[in-house]
Image (cartoon, rainbow, N blue to C red):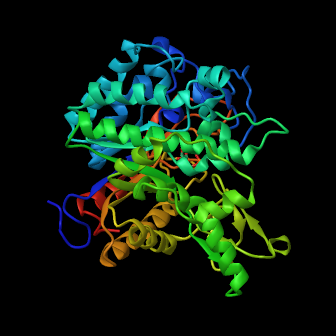
Amino acid sequence: NKADETFPKDFLWGGATAANQLEGAYLEDDKGLSTADVLPNGSLGEIDEDAGEECLYHEGIDFYHRYKEDIELFAEMGFDCLRVSIAWTRIFPKGNEESPNQAGLQFYDNLFDELLKYDIEPVVTLSHYEMPLHLVKEYGGWRNRKLVKFFERYAKVVFDRYKDKVKYWLTFNEINAIFHTPFNAGGLILEDGENKEEIKYQAAHHQFVASALAVKACHEIIPDAQIGSMSLAIPFYPYTCDPDDVLKAMKRERELFFFTDVQARGYYPSYMDRIWAEDDIDIEMKEEDEVILKEHTVDYVGFSYYMSCAVSTFPEDKEQVSGNIVGGVKNPYLETTDWSWQIDPKGLRYIANRLYDRYQKPLFIVENGLGAVDEIEEDGSINDDYRIDYLEAHIEQLGEAIADGVDLMGYTSWGPIDLVSASTGEMKKRYGFIYVDRDNSGEGTLERIKKKSFDWYKEVIASNGEKV
Ligand code: BG6
């Protein structure tokens, strides 16, 4: 009984997750080692191949064995969709095998069946901050053109297998992260003396081609599916109206927009010519790439939104803030989270308008949320009013964006159940409506407990966004 006031009737409400941050079972059923499995301190930390239990991704929140119980809770909240990712290493443990691992395929069949049992649409990311570690060691990660073929093979296998179950897909999670966290986003280990920027652009090019080939395969194999791009969206505000600040903000913005420009428009934006010429960057492209990119653009633009940043020509004398991937100068008008990310609900309306103006394609907000420390009260309750406030303010701004004329497909809040953080590899930073009893040292019963925000989100969904 959804009211039809601000949000469209078929708006998709739900939550977003990533395989490596919640599944655990990191070696079970012949899964191969992934890049995430050797990042005990998250994407901003160092690689440690000997990481043991201190790497919380190994066990995650044991979703691999508890997904039924968790999906039941998502269904209770009334989810229309759940964003999950497939761990490439469950399907192709090393990445370069000829045929897939049946046990891995079976797991996702079971998972999608369980979602569909409750009419929850799976929204599936092909690559969310992980890839087979073997492809890093043997081929140097995405710097190597061979990865395009391996990825295409993987994508075709999963499209074919799940064609009747999955109608919403995303190619690479936060594809624009490769410049900031090159190992977890692209399997890149960069050596001193190498032209690091060039290698990152080369790897990005390979991902663009792989993404376009996945779009092509998806359209051929599942004609009624939609497949989108996924970028980290951060509005960069000039710190002052000094034209130098404005131009600097424009440049920062292009560092992020560049990726969606290629994926949604189908060609490299002209501003890249100057950047590459000035930085002495030469990218190898095959003749057919131009056509591949042009002909297989994404159906929708997915993005994550957590914060905005201010940009100043003189950052040195100003307070700094951080973020999951990029930080910047503190904006004096905004509050920050405990992890020093700026809270800016209106920035979501702003960036949604900017992206829609730029691409004229439907948008899907596939991540948004507040990472915070939650306390369990003596009576067992968890009163996360701060999370409700954060989400409420952002959803309100989504309504504004829709009123502005933006075509929005849906909203999936990040981590509807607590999971392991991507940037820092910890459990302490929680996003969920559902608490998971596990701490930073890996201790805990893994019990699930509903937080106050659980019932709040349930109401939001039941009222189709009217009750925020
Ligand atoms: C996004 C990622 O960058 O932000 C997620 O796509 C991640 O994987 C989320 O978890 C929140 O970041 P963090 O570091 O708080 O987990």
Using the image, determine if residue 312 lies above or below residue 220.
Answer: below
Q: 290 or 377: which is nearer to us?
A: 290
Residue 121: give x, y in percent of width and height.
26, 42
Residue 323, horizontal then vertical, whole percent: 65, 57
The image shows residue 93 at horizontal and vertical percentages of: 51, 17
Left or right of residue 421, residue 101 in this image:
left
Residue at image position (67%, 87%) is 241
Q: Residue drawn at (64%, 80%), measured in percent from left and top?
A: 333
Number of labelled discs? 0
Q: Residue furthest bottom?
A: 241
* Image quarter (top left, top right, bottom left or bottom right) of the N terminus: bottom left
- Residue 7 x/y as whole percent: 26, 67
Vertical arrangement, residue 367 with respect to residue 138, above or below: below
Residue extending farthest to the front is: 287
Residue 422 in sight: no
Q: Nearer the viewer, residue 98 or 343?
A: 98
Quadrant hosting residue 10: bottom left
Quadrant including the C terminus: bottom left
- In the figure, 172 relative to 61: above or below? below
Residue 192 visible in image: yes
The residue most toward the left is 1
